[in-house]
Image (spheres, helix red, strand yellow):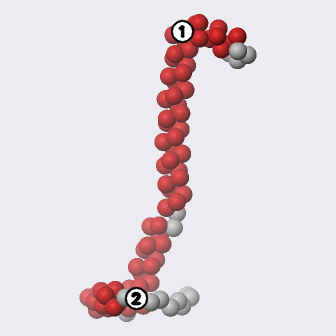
Amino acid sequence: MKKIQIRLTEENDKKLREIAERYGMSINSVASFIIGKWLDENYDLKDRILEGLAASQKEVMERVAKQVVEELFSNPEKIKELERHGLKLNF
């Protein structure tokens, strides 16, 4: 275990003492529990947000790609135009 020193406002100190008394715990134990709980819930928050963004971006790109392909197949002239501009489509 590692010891740390923290500073609290008087209001938060009072709340921490009341919680410790209510649960029959030491102030250090309550503070350790609160910090540990917060770390467990927030440590990888950035990674979870980025994963969610990546998933939503993938969904958007899949929808856009589907629309482009559907539009190409519904209009053969567009395929010919793309090929005239150097894009070769192999189906």
Q: Would residue 83 appear left or right of 44 to someone viewing this image?
A: right
The quadrant in which the N terminus is found is: bottom right
The residue lying at 43 percent from left, 74 percent from top is: 37
Residue 76 in the image: state x and y as whole percent: 58, 7
Q: Would residue 83 appear left or right of 76 to someone viewing this image?
A: right
The quadrant in which the C terminus is found is: top right
The residue lying at 43 percent from left, 73 percent from top is: 38
Residue 50 in the image: state x and y as whole percent: 53, 52
Q: Residues within 10 Å of mark 2 (few under 14, many from 20)?
A: few
Observer-nearest residue: 17 or 26? Answer: 17
Instruction: Identify whether 30 is placed above or below 38.
Output: below
| Mark 2, residue position | 8
Q: Amino acid at mark 1?
A: Asn
Q: Residues within 10 Å of mark 1 (few under 14, many from 20)?
A: few
Farthest residue, direction right: 86
Query: Can residue 58 be seen here?
Result: yes
Residues under numbered marks 1 and 2 in contact, where contact means CB atoms less than 8 Å apart: no
Q: Amino acid at mark 2?
A: Leu
Observer-nearest residue: 85 or 30? Answer: 85
Query: Can residue 91 be seen here?
Result: no
Q: Would residue 54 appear left or right of 9 to someone viewing this image?
A: right
Residue 68 in the image: state x and y as whole percent: 54, 21
Secondary element at tag 1: loop
What label does residue 75 carry, if any?
1
The residue lying at 70 percent from left, 15 percent from top is: 85
Quarter occupied by residue 9 = bottom left
Q: CA distance from mark 1 to mark 2?
A: 68 Å
